[in-house]
Image: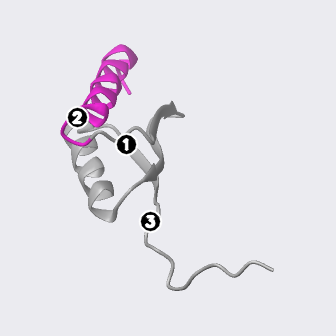
Amino acid sequence: MKDPEASEYRIERLRDRLTGDDISELGVRIDMRGGYVHLWGTVSTAACRTEILRIAETELGGLPVRADLTVACATAPERPEELE
């Protein structure tokens, strides 16, 4: 990272894009850690995760990125819960 100020600007732009109307993903955190950008959190679908990684590549091109994004399972249960 030759210019940390430029990197912070690009990270902030990525945050703005992820919270914007196109994707509206508020569960992703973005940090600068030891020379790379770390994306972590929970997203709603695998397609959403793919889109976030595409946007990150566009906004952060050239910066090393590590993504720890978990896809939340939001499917309905197969059977009713049994309470004792």
Amino acid at dot 3: Ala
| Residue closest to the eye, 83 or 44 | 83
Question: For the residue carrying disc 2, how many other residues have a C-alpha within 10 Å: few (<14), some (14-19), or many (20+)?
Answer: some
Disc sitting over residue 64 in the figure: 1
Whichever of labels 3 and 2 marks the residue nearer the N terminus, that label is: 2
- Asked whether, in this view, residue 19 is left or right of residue 4, the answer is left
| Residue closest to the eye, 60 or 30 | 30
Q: In this view, does 15 lie above or below 68?
A: above
Question: For the residue carrying disc 1, how many other residues have a C-alpha within 10 Å: few (<14), some (14-19), or many (20+)?
Answer: few
Magenta segment: does it hold 84? no
- Residue 11: x and y in percent read 34, 27
**Which label sits in the foreground, 1 or 2?**
2
Amino acid at dot 1: Pro
- Residue stretch in magenta: 1-23
Whichever of labels 1 and 2 marks the residue nearer the N terminus, that label is: 2
Q: Is residue 4 above or below residue 47?
A: above
- Residue 7: x and y in percent read 34, 23
Q: In this view, does 60 lie above or below 43?
A: above
State how far apart marks 3 and 2 are (Cα).
29 Å
Q: Name the residue under label 3.
A: 74
Q: Main secondary structure of the magenta part?
A: helix
Label tally: 3
Amino acid at dot 2: Glu
- Residue 17: x and y in percent read 24, 32
- The secondary structure type at the circle numbered 3 is loop
Q: Mark 2 points at which residue?
A: 59
| Residue closest to the eye, 47 or 7 | 47
